[in-house]
Image (tube, grey):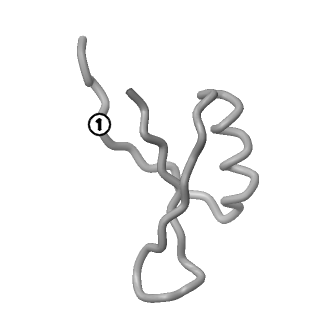
Amino acid sequence: MHNAINWFEIPTTQLNDAQRFYEAVLQQPMRREPMGFRDSNHVGLHALQ
């Protein structure tokens, strides 16, 4: 099945730890983007192909 999953969210309060874990498991780099109106809110994104 091609492109079966195109979006999913995994909430965390420890983005640094989650980023290290998912980069290791998926063997793909993650980039961070600001999210919302507060400077402290960020989201980690994987561009899987």
Q: Name the residue under label 1.
A: 6
Q: Is residue 26 above or below residue 38?
A: above
**The image quarter in which residue 26 lies:** top right
Q: Is residue 11 above or below residue 23?
A: below
Picture coordinates of residue 35, whole percent (x, y): 43, 73
- Say which of 12 and 4 sits in front: 4
* Rendered residue at 66%/28% (across/down): 25
* Rendered residue at 24%/16% (across/down): 2
Q: How crowded is mark 1: few (under 14 residues within 10 Å), some or many (20 or more)?
A: few
- Image side of residue 44 versus residue 13, left or right: left
* Rendered residue at 71%/61% (across/down): 14
Q: In this view, does 17 lie above or below 24?
A: below
Outermost bottom residue: 38
- Image side of residue 23 versus residue 8, left or right: right
Picture coordinates of residue 44, whole percent (x, y): 53, 56
Q: How many labels does the image show?
A: 1
Outermost top residue: 1
Q: In which quarter of the image is the C terminus?
A: top left
- Say which of 24 and 10 sits in front: 24
* Rendered residue at 68%/49% (across/down): 18
Picture coordinates of residue 8, whole percent (x, y): 38, 43
Q: In which quarter of the image is the N terminus?
A: top left
Q: Which structural element holds mark 1?
A: loop
The amino acid type found where label 1 is placed reads: Asn
Picture coordinates of residue 41, whole percent (x, y): 54, 77
